[in-house]
Image (spheres, rainbow, N blue to C red):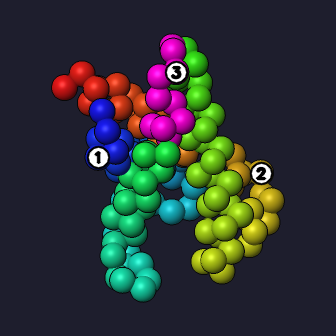
Amino acid sequence: MGYLEAFIAGFVSTLVFHQGAVAVLHAAGLWAKAPFDLTATRPFRVPALVSLAFWGGLWGIALWLAILGAPDPRYWVLAAVLGAAVPSFVALLVVFPLKGLPLAAGWDPKVIGAVLFLNGAWGLGTALLLRLLARL
């Protein structure tokens, strides 16, 4: 297991687990944006989904390094907690303002809860894919 596998796990987890969670929240009326957004981003005009998955891959490397060698059930708890917390804090406190959105979504608990859920799903998915890739 190495950096490339960790990147792949985070990338694929974004497409499957994160966007799957977006689909569930969107269908329930709890998240405005639909999953699998292909809108071009700035400045490179990359589809939003590809950009998100790329960043998910980079976060996958960080998560892998953080949970590497952790025994069960600590491995899964760390994946869920770190997956939910760290990317969410960066998104809410850095990315949102850079995109012209209110800091921490104006402290709206509905948005914060949804972001934590989405990234927690990504973290657990990444941990699962890391385990599966380690068996190959």
Please tell me the numbered disc located at residue 71.
none
Q: CA distance from mark 1 to mark 2?
A: 35 Å
The answer to which of marks 3 and 2 sits earlier in the sequence is 3
- Element carrying mark 1: helix
Crowd band around label 3 with a 10 angstrom C-alpha radius: few (<14), some (14–19), many (20+) = few
Above or below — where is 114 with respect to 71? below
Position in image of residue 22 (x %, y %): 48, 50
Q: Which sits earlier in the primary sequence, circle 3 or circle 1?
A: 1
Quadrant of residue 91 within the rendered picture: bottom right
Q: Is residue 69 magenta?
A: yes
Q: What's the distance in space between the residues labelled 3 and 2, CA to CA? A: 31 Å
Residue behind mark 3: 70
Q: Residue at x 63, y 48 (%)?
A: 86
| Within-10-Å neighbours for mark 2: few <14, some 14–19, many 20+ | few
Does residue 28 appear left or right of residue 111 in this picture?
Answer: left
Taking depth in this image into account, of 110 and 18 the one nearest to the observer is: 18
Q: Residue furthest left?
A: 136
Expressed as whole percent of the image width and height from the top left, the position of residue 125 reads: 42, 35
The magenta segment is 63-72
Q: Which residue is mark 1?
A: 4
Quadrant including the N terminus = top left
Q: Earlier in the sequence, mark 1 or mark 2?
A: 1
Q: Is residue 35 visible?
A: no
Residue drawn at 54 percent across, 45 percent down: 118
Q: Residue 4, relative to residue 45: is it above or below?
A: above
- Residue bearing mark 2: 109
Neighbours of disc 1 within 10 Å: few (<14), some (14-19), many (20+): few
The kind of residue tagged 2 is: Pro
List x then y, in percent, for residue 131. 34, 25
Amino acid type of the residue tagged 3 in the rendering: Ala
Does residue 30 sit above or below 64 in this rendering? below
Q: Could you tell me residue 65's position as x and y percent?
A: 48, 38
